[in-house]
Amino acid sequence: MSDDSETEHLAFAARLLAHDDGDEYGPVVPPITQTSLFTFGSYAEMERNYTAERPRTTYSRVGNPNVRAFEEKMAALEGGEDAIGFASGMGAISSAVLAVVSPGERIVCVRNVYPDTYRFFEILLRRFDVSVDYVDGADEEAVRASLPGAQVLYLESPTSWTMEAHVVSRLAALAREAGAISIIDNSWATPIFQRPLELGCDVVVHSASKYLCGHSDTVAGVAVASRQHVERIRSGIAPYLGAKLAPLDAWLLLRGLRTLTVRMKAIEATALTLARRLAEHPAVERVHHPALMGDLPEGLHGTSGLFSVDFGDRVDIPRFIDALALFRLGVSWGGHESLAMPAKLARSQANGPNSVIDFDVPPGLVRLNVGLEGLEALWSDLENAVETSKR
Ligand SMILES: *Cc1c(COP(=O)(O)O)cnc(C)c1O
């Protein structure tokens, strides 16, 4: 890592660790404002508030101090003017998209996005006559060709499971040229490694349940953008769908953000070493990790701890999974604990009765989420499980 980006990391850390505004006692951690409503002392005070340009919050569905503190930190981290918190990543994604599309309009989406994003497009948006075309985000010509007439370019980089990292600045520029709004899911990289607004994207969305939280104890989401874009979501969609972020969850997210920089750097180093060792292991066919698939695209300054290993048919996957002791078996990712998720099971879920997804991921693939247990302990766990299960 260059000195410049190292300095930048430290500046980020300082911003994240800075204490939150507390009360007169100056607590370093703000109290949880666990209240549904906020009252007024008089008719006149309430009237003044209702006619103010920026009224203070009156009800926690639309505003709460803990939620606001989280939103302000996220806006600062992503380099956006404003942010809005949600009850889940899907709350953020669906609200950000619904704020800008209308019936009859079209979305262009990169392939291999998060499966529930795909289902949201295919199951829900289609009912409202919004169509979605999927393109390979690495194929700029294909993206350019599909954009004319589209309202939205939906991006996720790196993509889910296959970890294809795109040149986000190029795709954002193509969207802008075509008059489309670009929305990007930045859950994998976090603002520590990629800041899409600085790369020209219009809206950044996150599953805050992953790295932003970092402790696997919250489901939450956030959208960051210009003041105007956030206002469209905040006043046009959020109050009516009501997927609001809870005060306790916002408080937990603020707790998680304080260590985001150090967690990401530790996870990056461990995951990269594990990925490189796995890539050289004779039982491994291929490792899907952006740093092992050529140079990182411009704008991606580091890599996180979620990557996939394709064992082909060299390993008995159920035996491999059951032989793991430190890596636990589970969905989700981004927490302190290491996890393994076999594509075969994700695939059977994705192709289940309620699905339209064509989940095109090889059956010998296992997705790993690298946590904070330590490099050598995790490596011996993987080595041992491969030894037990290889064919
Ligand atoms: C988990 C995830 C989501 C959905 O977030 P929730 O908080 O579970 O609603 C969206 N995008 C990506 C890339 C994810 O991994």
Image (cartoon, rainbow, N blue to C red):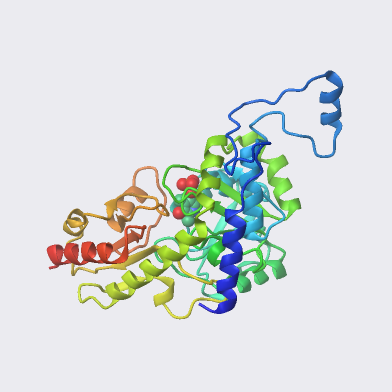
Q: Could you say where residue 373 lies in the image, as x and y percent from the top left?
A: 32, 58
Q: Is residue 297 visible?
A: yes
Q: Could you say where residue 290 lies in the image, as x and y percent from the top left?
A: 43, 72
Question: Quick one: quadrant of the C terminus?
Answer: bottom left
In the image, residue 4 above or below residue 222: below
Q: Nearer the viewer, residue 211 or 287?
A: 211
In the image: residue 348, left or right of residue 386: right
Q: Could you say where residue 288 lies in the image, as x and y percent from the top left?
A: 37, 70
Q: Residue visible at 25% across and 55% down?
A: 326
Q: Residue visible at 66% across and 43% down?
A: 21
In the image, residue 54 above or below residue 205: above
Q: Residue visible at 75% across and 52% down?
A: 227
Q: Is residue 87 visible?
A: no
In the image: residue 33, left or right of residue 333: right
Identify the residue at the far front of this view.
25
In the image: residue 105, left or right of residue 45: left
In the image: residue 270, left or right of residue 145: left
Task: Indicate the quadrant where residue 147 lies.
Answer: bottom right
Q: Nearer the viewer, residue 273 or 314?
A: 273
Q: Residue visible at 33% across and 60% down?
A: 368
Q: Could you say where residue 210 lies in the image, as x and y percent from the top left?
A: 46, 52
How many numbered markers are drawn? 0
